Amino acid sequence: MLLINVLLVDDQDIILQGLSMILGKANDMTIVGAVRNGQEAINKCKTENVDIVLMDIRMPVVNGVEATQSIKASNPDIKVIMLTTFQDDEYIFNSLKYGASGYLLKDAMPTEISEAIRTVYHGGTLINPTVATKIVNQFKKIAGEEEQASSMDIEQLTIREKDICKLLAEGHNNKEIANVLFLSEGTVKNHITNILSKLQLRDRTQLAIFAVKNKL
């Protein structure tokens, strides 16, 4: 069985211990490290084979947002899930902006944490609909940039492309989308590439936010 290599990053020992206990029971995951700040996470990702990082947002030395930016710049294949105890719009926004695949509340149920890791590992995203609009608003407010895709851009999408956007926003990976729509994974991948090009979006996470905001 192919194991998912998970790196835990949090400045609180009790959180690290709890996550280690939860994920230690999953037979398809292995913990490759448990570190206390973003700089240690950056270093670990350079020396270990890491698939998924569970990253706390607020930490000393280097926070989770800065660490995510550095890790994704060096190795885009590593997926990052942000951990937070609150819905901190600005931090969540910046995390997604720099390439995080979504976020989890620290009080999430053990099964939610394990399933979130599997979802992201297989290409899915974790965008909570209740904060999607806030994130888009932060994009305007904090970055001072115009929204990258407007409602007019939706008209460029075919019915099939809209269906794919909806499923992607629900967190489905390419294989799951292919099964639902009776397509091949390659066809789904090509559709997503075309959609990103049409909407001038960077990645699946931005597309998921767009889909939720525009109620596709």
Image (cartoon, grey):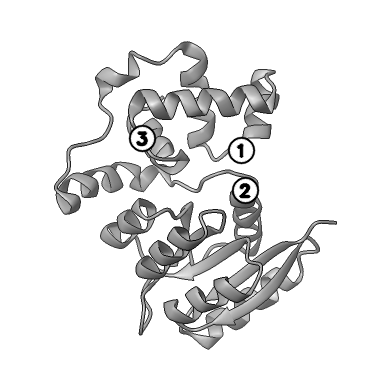
Please tell me which residue is depicted at 38% across the width and 52% down the height of the picture: 96
Q: How far apart are the alpha carbons under marks 1 and 3? A: 18 Å
The answer to whether residue 157 is above or below residue 58 is above
Q: Which residue is mark 1?
A: 173
Q: Which residue is mark 3?
A: 201
Which numbered disc flags the more N-terminal residue, 1 or 3? 1
Q: How far apart are the alpha carbons under marks 1 and 2? A: 7 Å
Which residue type carries mark 1?
A: Asn
The answer to whether residue 195 is above or below residue 174 is above
SS under mark 3: loop
Q: Position of residue 85 (x, y in %)?
A: 41, 69
> Considering depth in this image, is 115 or 42 the residue closer to the camera?
42
From this viewpoint, is residue 54 visible?
yes
Which numbered disc flags the more N-terminal residue, 1 or 2? 2
Which residue type carries mark 3?
A: Leu
Please tell me which residue is depicted at 43% across the width and 76% down the height of the picture: 38
- Tags 1 and 2 touching, CB below 8 Å: yes
Which residue type carries mark 2?
A: Thr
Q: How far apart are the alpha carbons under marks 2 and 3? A: 21 Å
Q: Position of residue 1 (x, y in %)?
A: 85, 56
The answer to whether residue 94 is above or below residue 39 is above
Q: Which residue is mark 2?
A: 119
Give the number of the mark in front: 1 or 3.
3
> Considering depth in this image, is 53 or 172 the residue closer to the camera?
53
Image quarter (top left, top right, bottom left or bottom right) of the C terminus: top left
SS under mark 1: loop
Q: Position of residue 89 (x, y in %)?
A: 28, 57
